Image (cartoon, coloured by chain):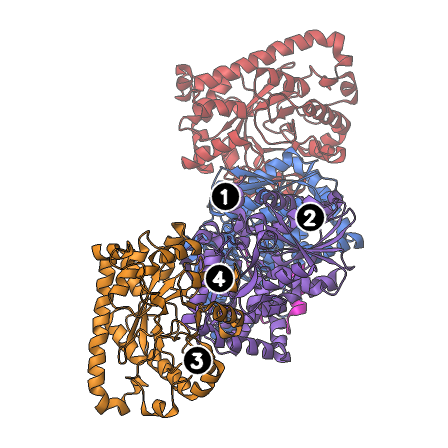
Chain colours: A purple, B blue, C red, D orange
Amino acid sequence: GRFGDFGGRFVPESLVPACDALAAAFQDAWADPAFRAELDDLLAVYAGRPTPLTPARTLSAALGVELLLKREDLAHTGSHKINNVLGQGLLARRMCKRRIIAETGAGQHGVAAATAAALLGLEATIFMGERDIERQRLNVLRMTTLGATVVPVTTGSRTLKDATNEAMRAWVADVDGAHFLLGSVGGPHPYPWMVRELQRVIGEEARAQSPYVPDVVVACVGGGSNAAGTFAGFADTAARLVGVEAAGGAAMSSGRPGVVHGARSMVLQDAEGQVAEAESIAAGLDYPGIGPEHAFLGAAGRAEYHAVKDDEVIAAVRRLARDEGIICALESAHAVAWVLREAGGPLLPAGSRIVLTLSGRGDKDMATLEATA
Amino acid sequence: GRFGDFGGRFVPESLVPACDALAAAFQDAWADPAFRAELDDLLAVYAGRPTPLTPARTLSAALGVELLLKREDLAHTGSHKINNVLGQGLLARRMCKRRIIAETGAGQHGVAAATAAALLGLEATIFMGERDIERQRLNVLRMTTLGATVVPVTTGSRTLKDATNEAMRAWVADVDGAHFLLGSVGGPHPYPWMVRELQRVIGEEARAQSPYVPDVVVACVGGGSNAAGTFAGFADTAARLVGVEAAGGAAMSSGRPGVVHGARSMVLQDAEGQVAEAESIAAGLDYPGIGPEHAFLGAAGRAEYHAVKDDEVIAAVRRLARDEGIICALESAHAVAWVLREAGGPLLPAGSRIVLTLSGRGDKDMATLEATA
Amino acid sequence: MSDLIEARDGKAVPPSTPEPARVATVAPQGRTLLVPYLTAGLTEDWTDYLLAVQAAGADAIEVGLPFSDPMLDGATIQQASDRALARGVTVASILQDLSRVRPQVRVPLIAFTYANLVFRPGAPEFCRRLAEAGVRGLIVPDLPLDEAAAVERAAAEAGVDLTLLVAPVTTDERLAEIVSRSRGYVYAISRMGTTGERAALASSAADLAARIKAAQQRSAPSHAASSAAPSATTSLAAPSRVESPAATAAGRNGASGARLPVLVGFGVSGPEQAVEAGRAGDGVVVGSALMRRVLDGATPADLGAEVAAMRAALDRADQEASADHASYAEISGHRG
Amino acid sequence: MSDLIEARDGKAVPPSTPEPARVATVAPQGRTLLVPYLTAGLTEDWTDYLLAVQAAGADAIEVGLPFSDPMLDGATIQQASDRALARGVTVASILQDLSRVRPQVRVPLIAFTYANLVFRPGAPEFCRRLAEAGVRGLIVPDLPLDEAAAVERAAAEAGVDLTLLVAPVTTDERLAEIVSRSRGYVYAISRMGTTGERAALASSAADLAARIKAAQQRSAPSHAASSAAPSATTSLAAPSRVESPAATAAGRNGASGARLPVLVGFGVSGPEQAVEAGRAGDGVVVGSALMRRVLDGATPADLGAEVAAMRAALDRADQEASADHASYAEISGHRG
């Protein structure tokens, strides 16, 4: 993945051959109808795809827009992450790896990765920041129940950024035996490309399910995999593509170009280049970077990126729950919060037809939500 | 709902007209294509139906059987309960009720009921035993987030039985304004019949999805709605129907005919007729009764009922998680535990083709599971 | 309390006293009936409470046989039931207690319990046991008309009156059938809700009592025809004080010679409400208000005083009513 | 420690001393090179440590510019980096510190840092600042060959040697290109993993060093051709002691007159492993083992003693090796 000025493969020399091999293997697999068929079958009979496109009738009426929700919260394990891990899991098996390594923030990717590993008979080591372990306890229990080893990361901000560092270190140490199952569209080539391709199913389904080409397509962005997958389905339409970041982790809105975790992209950093610690109530968006393709889409003007604050996000979770009976993840609620804020205004005029991806469900966030009550 | 010697309508005179009206309204609605279409639409675009039928490949190979899992854990809110609440919710609206009252044990029905209420613009009051509130904290938070009022029940065993008493009392007090949204196939007519019809979609889907008529159809049974819905799809086949109870709440295996919560059925009780307190690790099966249709199917020999113990259930959750990457609810794990125990034996010979309904997901049970680690 | 203990010990009342429950009619004409409810077995000396309320002027007593899942009862009765069950009492032990005090009991005793306790031993066996213990009536709140046939037969065979309940929401057609099939009295559920004290008596109480009485009047001939032995044992004669001219005109005496009294229950919390409820029907059932006192520590004498106060209030009201009746009967909607 | 403080204060070494880093070749023939790594800014007196290890016999020093996300570093260096950053040090403040002690520095200083710190100000600006502070080399572990072009250009223009790394998994083809494009020395990553002490040196270290040397020998002519100014400033001459007859035959002197030394790093934890690593390559980089000592409270003098011990061990080994060489060179696979 090189996207204009962004992307690349800024990894230690020790990882270069592994990245090469992975890129070749994915290219090969992705062109192999048997691989695609096996993945499609798992997505359907195991992960529960297609996920529905749900009209949010009460909210639509209240906001004066037409809002359709792409329900990744209904996918197995509770988020879109399952799409990616099943693809990479099959790839790891195809590459004869015995083990997967993964980083996780909110734990959704960790749970998904542990799930794919259990299903496909692979070992799983999941790195997770200590702070995230505290605030996403449910997901930690889910991962260990699935047989994964969860390694607490105590360095730095003790969140996703540091977990990613640690996962890459672990990969270097077992590059032959392990596949690094990266959870988002960041990281070195081929990850941003591969993960986007594996998440493309979100956007393609949504486009097929939508009765019209929407005016606006909205998704939350941390690393940005659900947004990348959603956007991929609408890239060739006239729909505006909107990514919504956490105000405390808004790499697009507040970052500068930089290199972190193997790719050149937009990064929250100081004047010298030290990477900043993000600060969001949503562990999955508590990340100072963003996938390089988003940096490219933003620079090219094809997608726009906006930020919402923690309190807007909490209000959005509650509103969606009470109006539509859907408790979404704090991450996903960023997209909802933006729609709630902008509906009827210049950014989202009355009557707009919107497809919004709900990337995951909010069970994991109930304790956080309670603490803010 | 009168099923042979079982069923009936043992309710206070104050509830008789309401039961009559409900039976008439459901009969009318169920015959109304517009009602059916609206429900089917919600089940598809909102609740995520059809849920997949997943081959459990690792377990099947290990056990020497063919095991297919009907994935109600993937339905919105995380269990089959959503099928019933959407139907009754639409019915409540059709009957111009402004409010629903519900009882809940594990909280899955409570969450589902709160969800339907939020979606359809109804108030929700959920009664839940204090003991269940403690052990199913996540679901309590979900209900309140959905805008429902959760009323702790402090009487008796402080579990589902007592919550049901309390819900019926509340219904008596607001019989005009409120619909009692009963969660299982128990209670007075028309509930056992109505809820079975609303859950029939499980069995009908599974039958259509299964490549063959299975030898055995298995589901866990507390009140028994997921089993009733599953069995309904296979009643006219040669498949054996197996309901699996909690050893500590095995109304079929250890109960006697009795009247509780409005219906005559099998009930755990003492020699004088005092209803016993069930004792199961699964809050949703911690109930001394069972739906009257099960009592009938058992008496008629059409279905068989077996019991598994708490430790078998915990082992089953872990096994399914590690082998198939699916963390099911403690309730659902009863069905899995029975298959694990009997596969290859006389009750479940090698080579058996099994359809097993996973009634829900296990996120809610992670704390319980951790405590048993 | 000493007089009651004496009574219980059988010293004040000779054992040879005739079966008190056989007294079919306890209420003199013009007296509003007062029927206290007691949860049986709540305390070891629970029968002392029973005798105390009898002494205080109860016309009959509902004896609650505690059930694990008292669906129709509110918090107070449920708490009393739970406490009694926690003491280990059983239907058998309660009936034994009653047999022991039977010599002192002069008013009809009516068992109040739930269907499962009736069905577990079987309705015939259950009713036989009641009868053996001197209990002459039975109320099963979760046994509506449609499910009652077997218990009705069994009760009739055992000589026990199965009293049916009518709710404010009961349809006219259904109400007519309940009235025709109920024995002993007709229990008018004063409000939609569970048993328990309320700040005010529901207006539905008066409306319902009026509807029941109207149905009784309409159905009197058929009632007489269908009931070979109506109110065989426990029935409390309906007092004449509240009869409207229309009721008298329709004729209210069947084979039993009197229509059944209409007792109003659920939510009667003190003398004032008792008067109001009694005025609506022919009498009043008071349960939670009394059991609340017992749970809070009232002695048999305390409870007797409570019931005596209600009795006095009812008597005063009865006197006022009979004074008023001549001039106001026509405009008093409350009086049916 | 007093002698070092004196040195730092510029009293022992006159300010007019010629630029120490300009000394291109620090290693006499036959000496195994010792290159300590220090995290810059870890303590206020961090340059005292630098001078101490210089005094103890370092042939060059890698100066780690702390980065928030040191992906290739293990726990020790990461902890040192975090602590330095927590003190508020910046690249600017570190380079300022270095400028201050520049008069006392007599060995080449090589900056070790991550790509983002290079790109943030821009590679030309970054390299210019390094050069201004007297830093003569640069290592960027997350800048593989494929991404290195811009920094290579900028470094060359600033007169800074960009040293590239080779890993055990590097393919022959790629290794050849790295060898040809690396400046100053070639950094052989001894094992797959992050920096940090290990119980034993990986066998991959010797294999890799041998592969690098073989590639150097094969590419010497083209290397000379493609590099107008190879190892312009910091290069440490590869000692001749370990040359195989084949290497000598292929000719290892390009325009620079010497092939670049191969330094083995990652996981060298003490004198014994230093000797082993030095034997595999032409020298050794020791980082985590030293920084662990500093984190644990070692003074500059303590650290100097540690490095001196390594230096002494290497020197002893060198003497033994040259004595052995005549008789055993042909069978010593470890020696390339």
Disc 3 to disc 1: CB gap under 8 Å: no
Q: Amino acid at mark 2?
A: Val
Q: Give the distance between the C-alpha atoms of the residues marked 3 and 1, in whole angstroms.
A: 67 Å
The x and y percentages for residue A263 are 54, 65
The residue pinned by badge 1 equals B133
Name the residue carrying label 4: D126
**SS for dot 1:** helix
Q: Chain of mark 3?
A: D
- Residue at mark 2 shares a chain with residue at mark 1: no
What is the distance, in whole Å, between disc 4 and disc 1 at their CAs? 60 Å
**Which residue matches tag 2?**
A339
Residue B261 appears anywhere in the view: no
Q: Is residue D39 above or below residue B162?
A: below
Q: Secondary structure at mark 4?
A: helix
Q: Toward which corner of the image does residue C208 lie, by quadrant?
A: top right
- Point out the stretch of residues depicted in magenta: B201-221
Q: Residue at x 47, y 19 (%)?
A: C303
Residue at point 27%, 73% (across, down) = D274
Quadrant showing the N terminus of chain D: bottom left
Disc 3 versus disc 2: nearer the observer = 3
On-image quarter of the C terminus of chain D = bottom left
| Mark 3 vs mark 4: in front | 4
Q: Would you name the residue on which mark 3 appears?
A: D179
Identity, as a three-letter code, of the amino acid under mark 3 = Val
Front tag of 3 and 1? 3
Q: Do marks 3 and 1 share a subunit?
A: no
Q: Are marks 3 and 4 on the same chain?
A: yes
Q: Is residue B185 part of the magenta span, yes or no?
A: no
